[in-house]
């Protein structure tokens, strides 16, 4: 089949040896690419119970079938997959930019990294030439600095680089992997996995042409989707960016504020998308093959943080703004820049800081422990100081560097009640107490607390369902959304472009056939999406996660919303969660414990992993 390079590269970092294996057509069609292919390769090359930070834990880098092509947003993505040091289950993070396209042009669909280098190295891929080069001179450097240094050393500005910062080197469980200086494979702590292998960066140069099976059909789709991206479906991404959601969630009173102390931020007018774009945005950047241009780079032009520059999205603006009670954009931008500098997941970092502030205000931490930092809600200077501490894993930052679950265990007392996470992964910017569909989706998400595993929060926000009511039927809705999102992240199309897929499964099936030449139906892809999500559940089951892990933070289930307004008193009770979990497992054809049945595995062609459900 075209679309796929047809090759998986294996790199043993311990010995420095490399080998390649053919990607079979059967595997490609079953798992599509991206997170689907990556999880299959990880599961087939790992042992149950592996320590996430041990040499035996593989780190997989996988591409989609349209990577490297001209298809809008689909030509540029890549995914990292491993066992998450944060959750102990599936670790998975997708990023866009130009790195993925370059790797496909080098001739690879995936890389499986095993072992641990004796000293810091970076992987240099120049088509079929594979080398491990000394990285001792770039240790401690930020991802942007690392990228520049590698390009200078190799003498090629067009080399593409994905790297970790100091947080990854120090194996912080909230560390990420950054490409093109600002693009992050951000969640689940995979920067720590990369750091545990003494792998500072991956640099790639590819010179192969990417061809498609049906050029005329494909180019017609490229033109059509470019036009769709000029229309209303993605207007907010082209203009104000994802930051526009700050106003949307705040007006609906579903934006977690001050570590879930409230669901509405009273100073949103100081940090909304209009203010950001008018006063701070310096440039808007597009990824390879993208017609949207959604990356908004914000620059602080005056004041104590003058010169700070960061890509601003809803997620990092929320996490480092309302979530910690801060309404000063200069401090938020500086904190976001530091997250990028140290290679930290900004969402997890912001939630860790809000957790600390909550602990401080409730008297769980002494002033001596806080090292002259005054972490009360609303103190932007303290946020900036704490990001520095976390990035360096220094002092109070050591407490927070592995996320809120670990921090709460260290503090003891009732700190666990203030730790906003699911499965060990920090929550995102949607108040689950008054978004019941999103609450179910977050609870069952295979990578922990995250809205991006299903996008089901949109059903609540848009009034497609009663967002304050838990009822049967939500399980089917979440399942359907999860399956679509699994496909999007396996094709690796940007989720910001989802609304341009007017006929989601139909558009994807047409695209797959145009690129690969393999005829697939919308139903075939629907099954593939279900297969990928079931595979993720098998991984989590093998690694010891159970129904008890499909739960919600203590505050979501025990502290009703206190803000006056339509959501006052909203909370998710255990009875409501159990009702929705039963409904979800039934929609998936799983047992009441949340384990896929042997019949379901046979139906999805996953019999080779039957031993996991028999254990």
Image: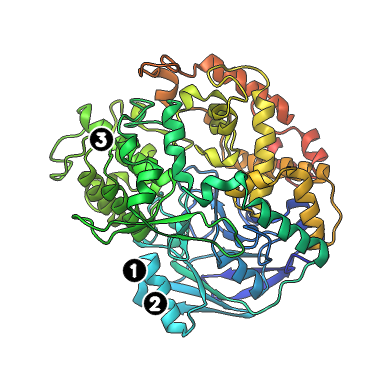
How many residues crowd around disc 1 within 10 Å: few (fewer than 14), some, or many (20 or more)? many
Q: Is residue 573 above or below residue 175?
A: above
Q: Earlier in the sequence, mark 2 or mark 3?
A: 2
Q: Is residue 14 left or right of residue 593?
A: left
Question: Residue 498: image x %, image y %?
Answer: 64, 46
Question: Which image quarter is the N terminus in?
Answer: bottom right
Q: Earlier in the sequence, mark 2 or mark 1?
A: 1
**Based on the displayed image, in which of its 4 quarters is residue 592 positioned?**
top right
Res. 141 mark: 1
Question: Residue 555: image x %, image y %?
Answer: 39, 24
The reply to whether dot 2 and dot 1 touch (C-beta < 8 Å) is yes
> Label 2: which residue?
149
How many residues crowd around disc 2 within 10 Å: few (fewer than 14), some, or many (20 or more)? some
Res. 357 mark: 3
Q: Is residue 346 left or right of residue 21?
A: left
The reply to whether dot 1 and dot 3 touch (C-beta < 8 Å) is no
Question: Which image quarter is the C terminus in?
Answer: top right
Question: Residue 525: image x %, image y %?
Answer: 78, 46
Q: Is residue 570 above or below residue 190?
A: above
Q: CA distance from mark 1 to mark 3?
A: 29 Å
| Closer to the camera in the image, 433 or 24 | 433
- The residue depicted at 54 percent of the width and 30 percent of the height is 443
Q: Earlier in the sequence, mark 1 or mark 3?
A: 1
Looking at the rendered structure, the secondary structure element under dot 1 is: loop
């Amino acid at each position: 089949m075209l679309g796929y390079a047809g090759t998986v590269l294996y790199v043993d970092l311990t010995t420095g040896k490399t080998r390649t294996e053919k990607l079979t057509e059967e595997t490609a069609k079953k798992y599509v690419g991206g997170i689907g292919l990556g999880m299959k390769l990880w599961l087939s090359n790992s042992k149950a119970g592996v320590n996430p930070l041990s040499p035996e834990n593989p780190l997989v880098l996988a591409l989609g079938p349209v990577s490297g092509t001209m298809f809008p947003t689909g030509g540029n993505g890549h995914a990292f997959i491993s066992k998450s040091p944060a959750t102990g289950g599936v670790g998975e993070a997708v990023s866009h930019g130009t790195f993925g396209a370059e790797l496909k042009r080098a001739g690879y669909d995936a890389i499986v990294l095993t072992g641990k280098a004796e000293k810091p190295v970076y992987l240099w891929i120049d088509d079929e030439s594979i080398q491990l080069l000394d990285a001792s001179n770039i240790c401690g450097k930020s991802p942007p600095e690392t990228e520049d240094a590698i390009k200078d050393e190799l003498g090629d500005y067009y080399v593409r680089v994905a790297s970790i910062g100091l947080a990854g080197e120090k194996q912080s469980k909230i560390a990420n992997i950054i490409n093109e200086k600002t693009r992050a494979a951000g969640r689940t702590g995979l920067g720590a996995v990369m750091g545990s292998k003494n792998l500072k960066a991956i640099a790639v140069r590819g010179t192969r042409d990417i061809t498609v099976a049906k050029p005329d059909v494909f180019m017609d789709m490229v033109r059509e989707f470019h036009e769709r991206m000029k229309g209303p479906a993605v207007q907010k991404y082209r203009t104000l960016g994802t930051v526009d959601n700050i106003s949307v969630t705040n007006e609906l009173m579903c934006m977690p504020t001050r570590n879930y102390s409230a669901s509405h931020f009273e100073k949103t007018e100081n940090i909304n998308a209009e203010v950001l774009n008018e006063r701070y945005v310096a440039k808007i950047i597009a990824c390879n093959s993208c017609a949207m241009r959604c990356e908004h780079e914000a620059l602080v032009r005056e004041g104590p943080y003058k010169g700070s520059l960061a890509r601003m999205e809803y997620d990092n603006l929320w996490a480092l703004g309302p979530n910690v009670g801060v309404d000063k954009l200069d401090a938020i931008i500086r904190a976001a820049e530091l997250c990028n500098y140290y290679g930290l997941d900004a969402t997890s970092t912001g939630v860790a800081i809000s957790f600390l502030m909550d602990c401080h205000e409730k008297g769980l931490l002494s002033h001596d422990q806080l090292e002259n930092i005054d972490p009360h809600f609303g103190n932007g200077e303290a946020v900036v100081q704490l990001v520095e501490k976390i990035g360096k894993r220094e002092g109070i930052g050591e407490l927070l560097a592995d996320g809120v679950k670990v921090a709460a265990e260290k503090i003891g007392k009732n700190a666990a009640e203030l730790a906003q996470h699911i499965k060990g992964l920090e929550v995102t910017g949607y108040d689950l107490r008054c978004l019941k569909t999103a609450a179910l989706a977050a609870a069952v998400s295979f990578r922990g607390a995250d809205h991006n595993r299903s996008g089901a929060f949109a059903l609540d926000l848009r009034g497609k369902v009663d967002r304050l009511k838990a009822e049967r039927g939500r399980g089917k809705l979440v399942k359907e959304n999860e399956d679509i999102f699994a496909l999007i992240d396996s094709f690796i199309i940007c989720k910001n472009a989802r609304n341009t897929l007017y006929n989601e499964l139909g558009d994807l099936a047409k695209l797959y056939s145009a690129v690969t030449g393999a005829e697939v139906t919308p139903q075939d892809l629907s099954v593939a999406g279900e297969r990928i999500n079931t595979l993720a559940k098998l991984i989590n089951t093998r690694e010891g996660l159970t129904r008890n892990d499909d739960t919600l933070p203590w505050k979501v289930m025990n502290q009703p919303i206190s803000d006056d307004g339509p959501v006052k008193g909203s909370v998710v009770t255990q009875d409501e969660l159990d009702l929705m979990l039963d409904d979800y497992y039934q929609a998936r054809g799983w047992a009441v414990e949340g384990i896929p049945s042997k019949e379901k595995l046979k139906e999805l062609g996953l019999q080779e992993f039957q031993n996991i459900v028999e254990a």
